[in-house]
Image (cartoon, rainbow, N blue to C red):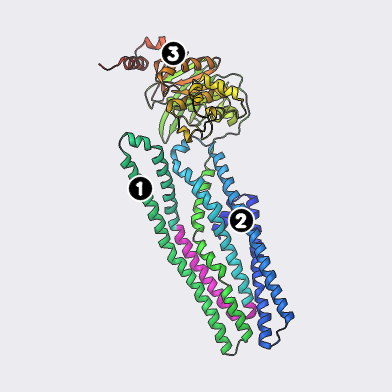
Amino acid sequence: MHSVKRFFDFCGPTERKKYYTSVALGVFEALVVAWRIPAAYLIFSAILSGGVTMTLFWQVLAIMIVSTLLRMVSMRFSSMLQTEAGYTTCANKRMEIAEHLKFLPMGYFNENSLGNITNVTTNNMEQVGDVATRAVMLVLQGTIGAVVIDIFMLFFDWRVGLICTVGMVIFYLFNLITRSVSAKYAPVKLDADEHIVGAVIEFIQGISEARNYNLAERSNDKLAKAILRKEKADIMVELKVIPLVGFQSLILKVTGVCIVGSSIAFYLAGTMELLTTMILILCAFMVFDGLDSAGIYSALLRVIENGVNKAEAVLKTEPMDIDGEDVKPESYDLVMEDVDFAYESRKIIDDLSLTIPQNTTTAIVGPSGGGKTTVTKLLARFWDVDKGRVTLGGRDVRDYSFDSLMNNFSFVFQNVYLFEDTIANNIRFSNPDAPMEDVVKAAKAACCHDFISALPDGYETVIGENGASLSGGEKQRISIARAIMKDAPIIILDEATANVDPENEKELTEAIENLTREKTIIMIAHRLKTVKHADNIIVIDKGRIVQSGTHEELISVDGIYRNFVADRKQAVSWKLA
């Protein structure tokens, strides 16, 4: 079946081998179960002929015991192989997706919601690791078991065996209809799964803002609608599929009745021996035991296949070309040459050229949405430019391997992300083996040593996910300490002091200036204090550089920068009457 093949193709070679071994064990299990038929034939034959002996009794008992023991051993190893293969596939694919996501253009994460990515790596992979394994193996083993017993029935009487075969064919034809209906509605269920994951994430992340603006009710309504959509999708799929699954089961039951009825009819008509009739009646109760479960689980195959397709869609998304050379640049000069960049047909950077000499401080200012952050991300190759090129040390950034390029950059963005780990490990993130002395030194330089020391467990305090237990300023200072710890030659600061308390701002600014000496600094800033001492200030508006120079040069001419300074001075002088 196509769905089964897609599942096996999705698994890795080692896991696929385990599944194939499990299928082989399933065939063996079906054969040892079928041994009971010859055993029953021997005992029934002896009873009918009056030739039951203790020797025969022990022979039949031995066959039954060996059959049971072999089945138990086979099931045990088969189940273990399935479990190992399923969970290993799930784990490997999650890691493969995570590794793949690292090298996708940042635009991918704008086009694809966090709910979609989360759903693929959680729900879809959980289905692969657990439900898919069970469904695929039950379908295969149920089919194999039914075919083996049907062959025995054909051997005893081809007429009854043919009835069984016809019943199985009708079952599988109707099963195709069931799986077709399941395939039709599976995307609805998967979309609802994705939507509810996204809604829950948005609800949790935005709960503080919703409360601040008294929009908690609206936020609750959005989540409630997503839950209701999920509920309706699940119920709809069940209502569409369950009647068909029930009819499948009915086909098997009717076929079993036909096998028993025809066997008795043939016996009464004198065309079948009593012994054969008894064996075929016994087979009627055995043949569809596994096939019934296979029919129920087969409806899940298309749902699983759609999940596999979603995972493969992520893995097939074209990454940036990261297979460059491991290069250590001769200098840390950064240059943008005639760069164009657009996102979703909207041009953000328009024929921009820029030179940033090493060991200088460049400040980027300009109206919101003008392209400031995009410039910094193009410099670090978070995206590839559409036209022109970006160079580091005279070489195109696309010539560098991803890791060798990233070794040259440290980032402190306005939106800080901290991991659910100790504060010490968050600071030493780029250098896990760094000694505690270096961690403390970086923390002191970033003006966060005092508040860390005041915590109950100090540097070993475990902070919540994304630093939920810290204030915005505390998170930003830890992020700066992390960047200091990396000690990269180029530092990009996106409003690094935005959330710092006024009493700490001066110390922090001086610490950054001292610790970034002889480094290339690129800062996006809205505060005059962090801009005026830069070696070069560039003003970006509508994706173009409209002004550049030092603070003294730009303040002396009319333009965006002078207005920027005037606005900041007015804001600083503003006070309550």
Which residue position is annotated with label 1? 224
- Residue 323: x percent and y percent? 60, 34
Q: Secondary structure at mark 2?
A: helix
Magenta stretch contains residue 63: no
Which residue is pictured at 31% across the width and 15% down the height?
570
Q: Is most of the magenta stretch helix, strand or loop?
A: helix
Query: Can residue 272 be seen here?
Result: yes
Which residue is pictured at 29% across the width and 16% down the height?
575
Q: Residue type at mark 1? A: Ala
- Residue 536: x percent and y percent? 46, 14
Quadrant of the image occupied by residue 494: top left
Which residue position is annotated with label 3? 549
For the residue pair 229 and 509, the one nearer the viewer reads as 509
Mark 3 or 1, closer to the camera: 1
Q: Residue type at mark 3? A: Gly
- Please report whichever mark, 2 or 3, sits nearer to the chain's N-terminal start: 2
In whole angstroms, how far apart are the C-alphas of marks 2 and 3? 66 Å
As drawn, 506 above or below 294: above
In whole angstroms, how far apart are the C-alphas of marks 3 and 1? 53 Å
Q: Residue type at mark 2? A: Gln
For the residue pair 458 and 317, the one nearer the viewer reads as 458
Toward the front, the furthest residue is 456
Which residue position is annotated with label 2? 82
Mark 2 or 3, closer to the camera: 2
* Magenta highlight range: 154-183
